[in-house]
């Protein structure tokens, strides 16, 4: 099964939406295999958002990500990377489809509730960036046979 990284951004912590957003992923049937609160630093953000380093908004993006601690979560499931990206919606909350997290909870292109890994390769790198091996857990959900068909697992 795939693993993917989600960060609940400071805007989500400040707005008291942590429980609601985690609940969406839980209800979908994704399996939570790691979660921790952490204060991000310039160092980790420069790595994490290296593709945006030259953008004029890079400074305020980093500041917004350091405004409070974030919740880093690792979710597991079949096709988890794509499923979580689809649930997240497009970057700008004003353009994101209703029914997606960004579409339902935000009005901003930056204060957009969650980060979600965008490919299997990125997910592997990002999970390593935020979690030590011993911070991720293996367990069998008791309802697994009702989450997926036998020929899907
Ligand atoms: N971002 C921004 N202004 C922009 C584009 C992106 O502030 O014009 C921020 C926004 O918080 C976004 C993050 O940079 O979530 C990472 O950008 P990316 O293009 O990777 O979007 P995402 O994968 O988060 O949808
Ligand atoms: Mg991205």
Image (spheres, grey):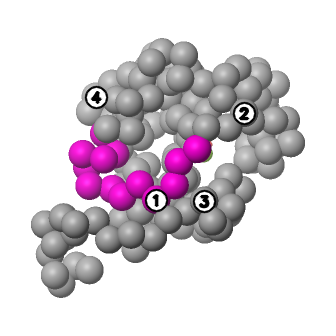
For the record, the magenta segment spans: 24-36
Residue behind mark 3: 135
Q: Is the C-beta separation of discs 3 and 4 under 8 Å?
A: no
| Residue 28 on the magenta span | yes
Residue displayed at 45% across by 18% down:
16
Labels 4 and 2 touching (C-beta < 8 A): no
The residue to which callout 2 is attached is 39
- x%, y% of residue 89? 40, 38
Left or right: where 88 falls relative to 50: left
Label 1 sits on a secondary structure element that is: strand
Residue nearest the viewer, comparing 125 with 132: 132
- Asked whether residue 95 appears in the rendered view, the answer is no
Q: CA distance from mark 3 to mark 4?
A: 34 Å
- Of the image marks 3 and 4, the number of the one nearer the N terminus: 4
Which part of the image, by quadrant, shows the C terminus?
bottom left
Q: Along the horizontal axis of the image, is 141 left or right of 45?
A: left
How far apart marks 1 and 3 lie (CA) works out to 8 Å
Give the mark nearer the N terminus: 2 vs 3: 2
Q: Which quadrant of the figure shows ligand 2?
A: top right
């Amino acid at each position: 099964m795939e693993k993917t990284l989600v960060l609940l951004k400071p805007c989500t912590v400040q707005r008291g939406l942590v429980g609601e957003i985690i609940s969406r992923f839980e209800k979908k049937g994704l399996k939570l295999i790691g979660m921790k609160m952490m204060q991000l630093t310039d160092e980790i953000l420069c790595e994490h958002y290296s593709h945006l380093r030259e953008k004029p908004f890079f400074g305020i993006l980093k500041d917004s990500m350091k405004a409070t601690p974030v919740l880093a979560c690792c979710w597991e499931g079949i096709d988890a990377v794509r499923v979580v990206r689809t649930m997240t919606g497009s970057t700008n909350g004003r353009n994101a489809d209703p029914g997606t997290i960004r579409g339902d909870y935000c009005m901003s292109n930056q204060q957009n509730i969650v980060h979600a890994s965008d490919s299997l390769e990125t997910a592997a790198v990002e999970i390593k960036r935020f979690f030590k091996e011993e911070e991720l857990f293996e367990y069998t959900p008791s309802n697994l046979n009702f989450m997926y068909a036998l020929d899907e697992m």
